[in-house]
Image (cartoon, rainbow, N blue to C red):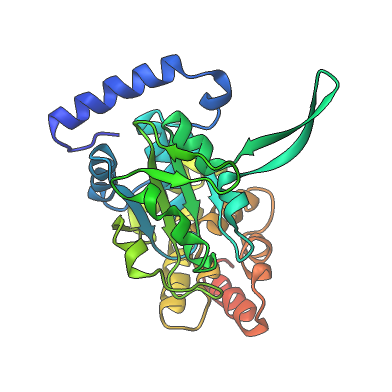
Amino acid sequence: MNLEIPIEIKEKLQQEAAKRIENLPDVYKDLIGKPGYTAPDASLVEDAVIALALGKNVLLKGPTGSGKTKLAELLSSLFGQPLHQVNASVDLDAEALLGHKTLSYQGGKQEIEFIPGPVTKAANHGHFLYIDEINIAKPETLPILNGMLDYRRTIANPFTGEVIKANPGFNVIAAINEGYIGTVPLNEALKNRFVVIEVPYIQGGTLKEMLKSQSMQKDDAILDQFVQLSSDLIGQAKAGHLSEDAASIRALLDAADLSVYLPAKRAIQRAIADKLEDARERALVSNVAATLFM
């Protein structure tokens, strides 16, 4: 990817990424993301790269299925940085973030061993931490990360009593779906610790190129129809007639793959419509598909 970023940042990024990958144990090389994200605007990736290169945390904000996780994986790839992932939920707690104690046996003796969690691993090794759907977590859980997200880059581990100090290279990338069912607004203290990058749905020619490169469907005319389908579904979602799930690029890719072996309307039914809970939304997706695929 040809990024228009300051030359001193680009050279430093390339040199450090190559050195980092060369010295990484194989187990961590497997955590480096793949460059599968297609940006609707190159400045979106450029701004995220510059922010991370300057040691800032990045908050990716956009609708479901717009490619936030794919973008995080691309950033991981560009920096040569393993990505330790947290999938936020209402059950997320300190143990899920920092780690937990367990019983182990060493030389026939029973010992208490601490198993580090993703935050601890990322901090100790100077890797990236990715928190997906951060605003689904309970508001009382997230403040324990505040020290890791500001200039201190430290956190007190309540399970071991130690203070964890992040090694150089540690950065946090988080993703947020605002207004989605089950989410809560991030408090200002937490949000202020991030640089915010808006991640919109990709559309038009950019979407077609992405489908052509990442889906099994290669028929030009059919891909054009899928691009139009995406545009129609996004329009319906913005108008409030469909949930954002219906406009997911991830689901669109699934439908395009299935359309190689199934009639397109049936592929859309399986990959998009049948995922929706509301019968009226399922019918609307089917009707939109029927106008494009005969």
The location of residue 224, given as percent across then percent down, is: 44, 57
The tally of labels here is: 0
Q: In which quarter of the image is residue 170?
A: top left
Location of the C terminus (image quadrant): bottom right
Relative placement, left or right, of 116 versus 175 is right
Relative placement, left or right, of 240 versus 280 is left
Question: Residue sitting at 36 percent across and 62 percent down?
Answer: 190
Work out whether residue 40 or residue 83 is closer to the camera in this orientation and state it: 83
Work out whether residue 201 or residue 265 is closer to the camera in this orientation and state it: 201
Using the rendered image of the protein, determine whether residue 202 is visible from the camera's viewpoint: no
263 shown above or below 70: below
The location of residue 168, given as percent across then percent down, is: 34, 31
Q: In which quarter of the image is residue 108?
A: top right
The residue sitting at the right extreme is 108
Work out whether residue 78 or residue 267 is closer to the camera in this orientation and state it: 78
Question: Residue sitting at 44 percent across and 61 percent down?
Answer: 143
The location of residue 187, given as percent across then percent down, is: 38, 70
Location of the N terminus (image quadrant): top left
Relative placement, left or right, of 80 versus 256 is left
Relative placement, left or right, of 162 versus 74 is right
Using the rendered image of the protein, determine whether residue 113 is visible from the camera's viewpoint: yes
Question: Residue sitting at 24 percent across and 34 percent down?
Answer: 2
41 shown above or below 22: below
